[in-house]
């Protein structure tokens, strides 16, 4: 409705208001912003309440108004709190110029002592504002700040935001940090199928052989979720764990058979050197053949029978 009201009428209404809900509502009228900037400043100077004007200017990237308000704001704890709010809002909306102006003024971007997750860098990372993330990191923002909390990189690995992930790792984020479920960034990237994130994590020293609280490895999760490009990539890594079983009793070979990927089964056999006794194939592979037949995985059955024959011949010559 407000968008249909002429600016002259809106300005008359707003000029008789103190900063409050109605004035904030008027700020949503995009065509009215330039007129309101001087009005907001006038209200701020008259009422000594700079917060609405500074927050609005920071969201909109109105640098001249930001500088004017900061110049008229006397130093105090209340003023610092107002400036921190403005910085968080600028990070939330990806307003690079506003963030730069506030940082240049000396607005602190350090994490609060009370573990408030509204930390400027965390906000920019969550909203995937890459230029703002780069600016904050260049000014000394810390990527890992709260012991016991999942690192900022977790959401990036879950969502496949590889560029911001690279920025955090280059700034010192721990590629092997764990959450409460004992999942790592590498685990999440494998589970959600983000191959490029896996490659970046490896560049910065991520461990391939990690297990979470359910004893799931990255390979097991990639197989469960049928992330075949990730499975192929993990099979190329020497450190890839192919023998660990999760708490449900599945290992990579079981899951490859169940999903009917004969090519993966072959590659697992080509890499795996089982540390089992000579009758391992009877206990493990023969039941897998029956399971594969029940699921009509004929190609898998053929591969398994070939491997059983090889193992049987090898054991019979001992």
Image (cartoon, rainbow, N blue to C red):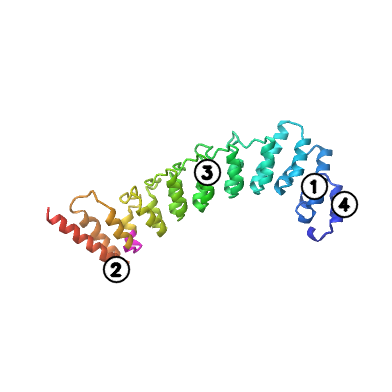
Q: How many residues crowd around disc 1 within 10 Å: few (fewer than 14), some, or many (20 or more)?
A: some
Residue visible at 74% across and 31% down?
75
Q: How many residues crowd around disc 2 within 10 Å: few (fewer than 14), some, or many (20 or more)?
A: some
Give, as a single range, the part of the protein colored magenta. 256-262
Front-lying residue, 192 or 91: 91
* Among numbered discs 1 and 3, the one appearing first in the sequence: 1
* Among numbered discs 2 and 3, the one appearing first in the sequence: 3
Residue tagged by mark 4?
Answer: 12
Residue tagged by mark 2?
Answer: 298
Q: Which mark is residue 168?
A: 3
Mark in the foreground, 3 or 4: 3
Q: Cα distance, mark 4 to mark 1?
A: 14 Å
Residue visible at 58% across and 44% down?
134
On the picture, is 309 further left or further right than 140? left
Residue tagged by mark 1?
Answer: 37
Q: Cα distance, mark 1 to mark 2?
A: 72 Å
Residue visible at 25% across and 56% down?
284
On the picture, is 248 further left or further right than 316? right
């Amino acid at each position: 409705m407000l968008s249909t009201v002429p600016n002259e009428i809106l300005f008359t209404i707003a000029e008789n208001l103190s900063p409050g809900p109605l004035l904030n509502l008027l700020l949503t009228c995009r065509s009215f912003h330039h007129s309101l900037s001087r009005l907001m400043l006038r209200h701020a100077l008259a009422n000594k309440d700079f917060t609405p004007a500074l927050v609005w200017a920071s969201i909109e990237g109105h640098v001249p108004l930001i500088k004017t308000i900061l110049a008229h704001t006397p130093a105090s704890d209340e003023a610092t709190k107002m400036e921190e709010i403005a910085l968080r809002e600028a990070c939330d909306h990806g307003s690079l110029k506003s963030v730069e102006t506030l940082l240049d003024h000396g607005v602190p971007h350090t994490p609060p002592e009370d573990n408030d997750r509204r930390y400027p860098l965390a906000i920019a990372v969550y909203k995937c504002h890459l230029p703002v993330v780069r600016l904050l990191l260049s000014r000394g923002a810390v990527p890992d700040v709260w012991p016991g909390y999942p690192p900022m990189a977790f959401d990036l690995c879950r969502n496949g935001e590889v560029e911001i992930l690279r920025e955090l790792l280059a700034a010192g984020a721990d590629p092997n940090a764990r959450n409460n479920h004992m999942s790592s960034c590498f685990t999440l990237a494998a589970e959600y199928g983000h191959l490029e994130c896996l490659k970046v994590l490896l560049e910065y020293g991520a461990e391939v052989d990690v297990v979470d609280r359910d004893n799931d490895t990255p390979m097991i999760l990639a197989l469960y979720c049928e992330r075949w490009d990730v499975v192929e990539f993990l099979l190329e890594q020497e450190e890839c764990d192919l023998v660990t079983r999760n708490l449900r009793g599945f290992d990579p070979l079981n899951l490859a058979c169940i999903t009917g990927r004969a090519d993966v089964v072959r590659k697992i056999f080509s890499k795996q050197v089982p540390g089992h006794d000579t009758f391992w194939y009877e206990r493990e592979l023969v039941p897998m053949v029956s399971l594969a037949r029940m699921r009509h995985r004929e190609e898998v059955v053929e591969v398994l029978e070939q491997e059983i024959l090889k193992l049987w011949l090898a054991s019979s010559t001992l």
